Amino acid sequence: MDGMILTLILLAPLAGMALILLLPDRDEQSTNLPAWLALLTSLFTFACTLHLPAHFVAHQTGFQFEENLAWINSPAIRYHVGVDGLSLWLVVLVGLLAPVGVLASWRAVKKDRKLFYALFLLQQTAMVGVFVSLDLMLYYGFWELSLIPIAVLTAMFGRNLGDASAAKAALRFFLYTFIPSAPLLVALLWLYAHTGSFDYATVQAAIASGTLPGWQLAWVSVAFLIAFAVKVPVLGLHGWLPDLFSEAPVAIAMIAAGKLGLYSLIRFHVELFPALAHRAAPWMIALAAVGILYGALLALVQKDFWKLLAYATLGSLSFCTLGIYGFTAAGMSGAVLQTLNEGIIGAALFLLFGVLYEPASASKLADFGGLATKTPRLATLFTIASLALIGLPLLNGFVGEFLVLSGTFTGVSRVWATVAALGVILSAAYMLGAIQKIFLATGAPAHATGHAAGHPSATARDLTGSETVAVALLALLMLALGIQPGLATDAIEPALQSITQSLRMGAQSRNAANLSPTHPESATVIASSPANLKGGR
Amino acid sequence: MNEPMLFLPLIALLPLAGFLLNGLFGSRLPKALVSTIALLFPLLSFALVARAAWMVHAGLALPVAEANAPTWIAVGTFHVGFQFVLDQLTLVMLLVVTGVGFLIHLYSVGYMEHESGYWRFFAYLNLFLFFMTVLVLAGNFLLMFVGWEGVGLASYLLIGFYIDRKSAGDAGIKAFVTNRVGDFGFLIAMFLLIAHFGTLSFSRITAQLSAHPTLTTGAATLICLCLVLGAVGKSAQIPLYVWLPDAMEGPTPVSALIHAATMVTAGVYMIARTHALFDLAPAALTVVAVIGTATAFFAATVAIVQTDIKRVLAYSTISQLGYMFLGCGVGAYSAAVFHLMTHAFFKGLLFLAAGSVIHGLGGEQDIRRMGGLRKTMPVTFWTMTAAVLAISGFFPFAGFFSKDAILAAAFQHGSTGKLLWMVGLVTALMTSFYMFRLWYLTFLGQSRAHSASDGHDHEHHHHAHESPWIMLLPLVLLALLSVCGGWIGIDRFAAFLAPATGMASAAPNAGHTELFLSVLAVLVAALGWFVAHLFFGRRTSAADDAAQRLAPLHRVLEHKYWIDEIYTSLIIRPIQWFARFGLGWLGELTLVRGSVWLLVGVTGLCGELLRRWQSGNLRSYAAWLAIGAAALLIFALAGTLLGMNSLADSIHWAVR
């Protein structure tokens, strides 16, 4: 079982997709059979992903549940998959979010359901594939594959198909993510040409040996970095995010940002190019710290909730970037935890606001108001998710932010940590402001809010039973991870230890190559000083 | 599980259970059951605290559940657990929080009887007790921060309890966000502590400080100033006090419990709790003393002219908290905590009595339209009188002892102490004046319910009535405490607290000086009463005459020095403008457009590099071509579907 489980997780959604495509077309308008099939498939897949943490050997470095089969002989591409503590919970997260996404689409998607759910499941396979691939070309295939359903589904099932803004958002996403993928592919091929292998460990060892030509390798790492930074997105490359959040189907928007890019940053930039990651770190830290404030400030003045959520997401993803490039144990653990948090909290908020949005396609905050009494379940869960987002202690967001900030403050830069911490003030302001505008009294006359026929507040409904269960489970998860973050970090830490190990080696090889002033003590990356990080530039 | 490990967390967990029961099922439960749940769990919690107090009284060791505490966050060498500790300081706080807290719960059963959302109110109230007990029981900074932010959440929820009032929602957000400014300081302080000590545990930090005090004065000052920022936010001191007057939007029992008796004193508690750090940072202590004195004076001036009964009390609370800060700032931590305790009695009582008046008048809060309630509401009147005498500092009421202890400590504190004492004394004069103003206008004279000329509906004044027993019982008990609460005396109180707050904070030796100061303080309080009597006791027009003669000053005070307006135009608006125009227009446009073309450029460059390096490797080149072509094909296809003629068109359109 252990040997096949990852393959099963990868194939199960594909099997569901095939079943859905085989359904007869004519029933589509009357029944929601594709959705049911997708739900069952995603629930089954989720159950399979739960096998991973159940049988994962914590405190063991290296990959587990590995499978390594020859696939294509020349070029030598292997089907090599496996998870370690870093990817473990991300796979489970994808498994968890799939049924939530199906629920969020249940009523929203009314036509072409077959195509929608088929592509939705394809997206799931692609995302899992990104997290488990240990062969660079296999990884690249999944990476590219993960971009297509998002773009296609946004273009076809976007929320504002009438005025073509959905298509525009899809194209913009496509541009942003596909273009950097080309240099990524070039970089992969360059690595293959110089190492003769796509195997992750082999390539990693070759880079660590320091025999690859230096300045070209630097360009290769930049290609990797940009491709991932766009997908996160990092400040400056986030142009696609607000559009996609506004236009993509809810189920797609909730998975589009964050985890793929962040995971790739850790695995294929920091871990693969430790020395070069050190050189990029000061820039990434600055971008992240500024990004936290930038996202929070813009979220503060948004009039549309999806846009608000987009900028809030930019802020909380910047926390992850900050933690990753601080190279401290606390910061990196916090970053991975925050990646999970963002996925959970974002999914809850997307589903909840999607329910309000759906009947009248209204997302302007001013369109709502006073819904607390009308939709009490929704209001309560929305408030809990918002509190998690703004980092209230005992909910998950706090632990991630605290670890990132404390790691940055003690190990990297007090100034940037202080700048980033300012975000906690602003996040409270914009999220509580949104809660007030949606659920509480807005001061507008009663006939303007909620009583006119067809008005968003008038058509709003509370959560159905299944939606309540789904979001309540997410809320419980926020609480569980907030009280016992060790549930996740116990598995994450050993994986991060091996990464900090390679960072240490990277620092040494960098010193050997005289890329920075030699600091023998800088081998202790865990507590690397700002001077050490700024070295080399 | 040994006994203390359960015992201490249980004090906090019992109200949490009440919150969960009422929060999850309260909407479907009958009112009586909701009240039972809401009262039972805080009462049980109080019983546990009382048991702990008895243990102390009997000379038993205090339960400490610090070792083997369940882990919360453990990453690398950093480790924080759910450590609960109980010492004398915590015990005093717990007695106040659960004792006064329970009385206010009881009162609320009567006060909130006719409100919709009854269950929600009590769920929030229990949630508050949970977080407040966590705050005072916490054995480390991070767990304290849980309570710290948590009481902020409960405060936010309760201020905004009347969800059909926009002003309530606004006030809730203002309170939470202003507190977050303080929490920012608290966070930075924690990071500094981690950097210096590698731990956040109170006992470990204290142990490290006493074993080998490596902390420089500069570092200690920085840490303490960050902590002060947190305390200033939570305890509504200058410059972050602005949220507290607005917080009066919440139901009156909330104002009594959270915004007078307990939560707002958390800043004082925190400074007393971390006094080992503050003792190393004299400059930070001076800042605390100056902030406290300035706030006490400033808020008292505003309180003099307020006309909303709750706003008068709110500014009074800010002012009294200033006294507590002054106490901390001059190193008299036990005096500050003493005043914290007596203040919880008499200010809680003042708010509850005010609530009783509001309740009896059917929602009227303007003291200009009250008057003559002495006859119709005798119990409220007499209990309120006890509270007014206590806060004004008349012997032998509770406030006399605690305020006196603070002023005496200030008087004997170095060179600046005399000045601080002087300002404190003037503030005491104003306190006595505005409290008796409130007292005269509310209870004495004739009812002015009909004299107002703005066409307000005064129907309810015909039915001004005394409140039910369930509201009066807490009033009477708190009145007893307001009278007797100070009789223990600062010396015995300080001696009791000494293990927690240090001997240095023990009260100065009694002597002629102190007797002189005490007599002076009572005289000043009597003077305040006398002036109030001249203005409001005999003829009501005297006050109006004075207001007209001092019109500019009156205007300044009436508008609270326009501080809210200044903050809005100097801080909030510029931030919004910067976000909207600086970032929203300029930043977003350049970043979004610029980055797309940057990406296109980088791609071209990489393709060029590939051609240069890899032209020999046909297989790789072929693979790149195939995949790249597929990508471009899909893109072009998508563009064609949308009616684009070329790839460039599509790109241009997409970024437009």
Image (cartoon, helix red, strand yellow):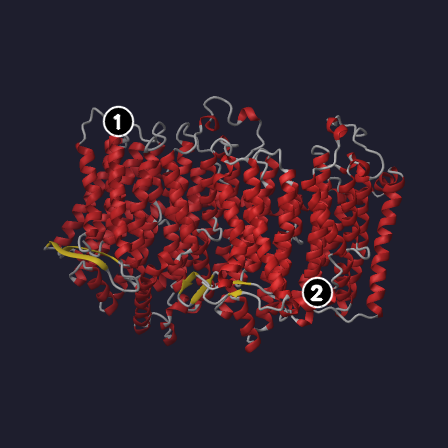
- Given residues B374 and B175, the one toward you in this image is B374
Please give the label number shown on residue B493. 2
Q: Is residue B6 above or below residue B538?
A: below
Q: Position of residue B491 (x, y in %)?
A: 74, 67
Q: Quadrant of the C terminus of chain B?
A: top left
Residue B606 or B120: which is nearer the viewer? B120
The front one of A248 and B493 is B493
Q: Which residue is mark 1?
A: A31
The chain under label 1 reads A
**Identity, as a three-letter code, of the amino acid under mark 1:** Thr
Q: Share a chain, discs 2 and 1?
A: no
User: What residue is rendered at 39% in x and 41% in y?
Assistant: A471
Task: Identify the residue at image location x=16%, y=60%.
Answer: A197
Q: Which mark is residue A212?
A: none
Task: Name the residue furthest bottom.
Answer: B212
Q: Secondary structure at mark 2?
A: helix
Q: Residue at x 21, y 66 (%)?
A: A206
Position of B202 compared to B320: left or right?
left
Report, in whole angstroms, how far the alpha carbon at label 2 lies from the one at label 1.
75 Å
